[in-house]
Image (tube, grey):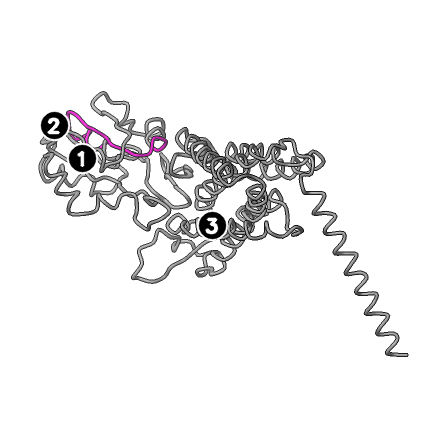
Amino acid sequence: MKGISLSTNDGSFAERLKQLSATLFKLLDWFTPAHPFIADKRARTFLVSFTMLFFELLCIRWIPSYVRYLSYFNNFLLLASFLGIGLGMLSARRQRFWFPPFPILLALLVVIIAKMKFQLLITSTQVLYYGIADQPSVQAENFLVLPIIFGIVTLCFIPLARSFGQLFSQLPPLTAYTYDIIGSLAGIAAFSAMAYFSLPPLVWFSILGALLLLLSAKRTVLFVAIVLAATLIEVGRLQAGAYWSPYYKIRLIPAIPKGYIVDVNGSSHQAMVPSQNREPFYKEVYRIFGSGSFHHALILGAGTGSDAAFALANGVDSITAVEIDPTIQHLGAQLHPDKPYSSSRVHVVINDGRSFLQNTTEHYDLIIFALPDSLTLTSNNTSLRLESFLLTQDAIASARTHL
C-alpha cells in the first residue's frame, strides 16, 4: 500500500510540475512579440542593437553615480554587459527559453540601486580612496556589492541579446551586420549627445522606455508601459535635487555659515565658501611673492572659482580659468559667494587642462594647478584617471614653457 501511495504521489508531483512548466511557457509565449509594432526584421535589428549600446552606456554612466567605487572600476560593468550579450546570443539557439522580460529586469536593477545602501570603506593606509571613513554608520567593505551589480547587469542584457541573436539568424549575414553596426553607432551617438547637453537620467530612461515600447508586442504594451512608468518614477525620485554634468552627478550641500559643498558621485569634491573661510594655503603664493606681483595667471582645474577669487583679491590683472566640467563652472558662476566668474578680469575656458596646455601660445607669470581631480577615468578600458597627465613631470615641464 505504501508503495502504491508513493507511486501516486510521484505521479501527482510530476503532473503538477508539467502543468507549472506549461504555464511558464505560456507566459513566455505571451511576452514573445508575435505581433510587434515594428515587424520588419531589419528595423528590429537596428532598434535592438541601438537599445543594447544605449543601455550599456546608461549603465556605465548611471550606476557609478550611486555605487561610489564603481566610478573607478566601471570596466566591471563593461564586462557584465559583454557576458550578458554572449549568454543571450547563445540562448537564441534554443527555441523555447524562459527568462524574465527586459522591462522587469530593468525595474529590478533600478530598485536595487535605489533601495540598497552601497558603501565601501577601505581602512588600509596603503590605499588613497575618496571614501566615507568619517561616517560612523559605515561598518566595513561590503563584498557583495560587486557580484550583485555584476549579476543584475548581466541578466539585463540576456533578453535583449537573445532577441538580437534570433533576428541575426533570420537575415543574410551582411545585412544583419550592417544594421547591427548602424544601430550601435546610433546608440552611442544618441547617448553621447545627451551627456554633452547634461541631460538627466530621467531623459535617458525615457528614451530607453520608448525603444522598449517600439520593440514590444501589441498585447503586452500596456504591461510594459506600467512597468516602465514605475521605473521612471523611481529614477526621477533618485535624481531629485541633483545636477547632471557630462561627467558627474552633482549635489550641493549647504555650508555653514555661507556657501555650498559640491558633492560629485557621492564624494565631497570642493567648496564654494567665502575666501575668509578658506584654508591658508590658498594665500601662500601671494604671501611669499607679495600681493600684486602677478599680472597674468592661468588656473587649471578652476572648478567653482575659489582660486580665481583669491587671485582677484590679490591684484592679478588677468586670469584664464580652465575647467573641464561646464556644469561645475556654471554652478560656481551662479552660487559662489565671492562671484569670481562675474569679474571682467576672468576669462573662462571649458577644456581639458592637458589639451589647453598643449595648444595655447600664451605665457603667464603664475600657473596654478588648482583642482585637477576628476574622480573619473579616461575610459572604461583603463584605470587611468582623467587628470593623470597633469600629475606627471611632463605636465610640469609643459607648464614651465608657458611661464
Percent position (x, y) of residue 108?
Answer: 59, 47
Image position of 128 (left or right of 166): left
Image quadrant where one finds the N terminus = bottom right
What is the three-letter code of the residue carrying label 1?
Gln
Which region is colored magenta?
309-328
> Marks 1/3: CA distance?
36 Å
Residue drawn 58% across and 36% down? Answer: 232
Image quadrant where one finds the C terminus = top left
Q: Which residue is the site of mark 3?
A: 82
Q: Which residue is the site of mark 2?
A: 295
What is the three-letter code of the residue carrying label 3?
Phe
**Regarding mark 1 in the picture, which secondary structure is present there?**
helix
Q: Of residues 321 and 61, which is closer to you in this image? A: 61
Report which quarter residue 128 is drawn in.
Answer: bottom left
What is the three-letter code of the residue carrying label 2?
His
> Marks 1/2: CA distance?
22 Å
Graded by Cα atoms within 10 Å as few (under 14), some (14 to 19) or many (20 or more), the crowding at tag 3 reads some
Q: Which residue is the site of mark 1?
A: 358
Residue drawn 67% across and 36% down? Answer: 217
Image position of 288 (left or right of 174): left
CB-based contact (under 8 Å), mark 1 and mark 2: no
Percent position (x, y) of residue 83?
Answer: 49, 53
Image position of 220 (left or right of 380): right
Q: Earlier in the sequence, mark 3 or mark 2?
A: 3
> Marks 3/2: CA distance?
53 Å
